[in-house]
Amino acid sequence: MAAKSRPKSDAPDVSDRVIRIREGVTAAILEHRLLPGTKLGEDEIGEIYGASRTLVRTALQQLAHEGIVNIEKNRGAFVARPTPADAREVFEARRLIEPTIVDHAVDAVSPAWIGRLQQHLTEERDAELRGDARASVRLSGEFHKLVAEMSGHSIYLGFLKELIARSSLIILLYRRHDTPACGTEHHAGIVTAIRKRDKETARAQMLSHLNEIEAELFLKDPVADELRLADVLGA
């Protein structure tokens, strides 16, 4: 007797939809199209991606685990709003892992990888020249991910993806408006050091770059911003 054919599983499609939702929300955060505190309605997201509330909830829960989304009981999901303390922790973590990432990238250097990095720098400069702020923000984060991909260290890459998404929210909240978020000249210096296989300079360039980004943030505790009306209106 011929075996009955089993119904085709939709598991891959389910997984793909969850990934699409996660990547879509993350990209919108990286490009500063979704602002901190924005409500992420399950029904609306489901309509956008043609996904059930269950799949949307799964994607949002995964993003919450990464610290990009906050889920509040009886209120729903919101784009995270990092505190100044969160910001300091994120940049401390980046300073711990990115110099090691760049070490591994130097070990993996090849003409093909240098070509990819140079092409990325060209895209960053083009975005900067045409005044495309959203593309500049996205490409800036993608540069750091590209170096991590080059390193071949999948664990560090996973950590860094999460830290970059959090960094984007932090920069949006706390950047001084008259300063760039992440200069292309810094990235070019890192690429030059990698190309020369100069680990010491590459590490130093990366640390200096991260320190400068954090220094350009106005990380003030919100409590300190509270003012008495009498102080403001009675002056």
Image: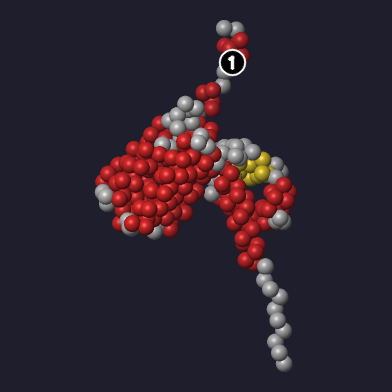
Residue type for callout 1:
Arg
Residue 207 higher or lower than 178, as above or below: below
Residue at image coords 54%, 39% = 134
Q: Is residue 91 visible?
A: yes
Tell me the quadrant of the picture where the C terminus can be found: top right
Q: Position of residue 87 (x, y in %)?
A: 47, 37
Q: Position of residue 174 (x, y in %)?
A: 50, 31
Which residue appears farthest toward the top when viewing the image? 235
Q: Give the camera-side residue of 230 and 96.
A: 96
Residue 126 higher or lower than 175, as above or below: below
Quarter-of-image position of residue 215: top left
Tell me the quadrant of the picture where the N terminus can be found: bottom right
Residue at image coords 48%, 50% = 161
Q: Give the camera-side residue of 211 and 105.
A: 105
Check disc 1 and report the residue beneath it: 228
- What secondary structure is found at the residue carrying circle 1? loop
Is disc 1 surrounded by few (<14), some (14 to 19) or many (20+) residues within 10 Å?
few
Residue at image coords 37%, 38% = 185
Q: Position of residue 27 (x, y in %)?
A: 56, 47
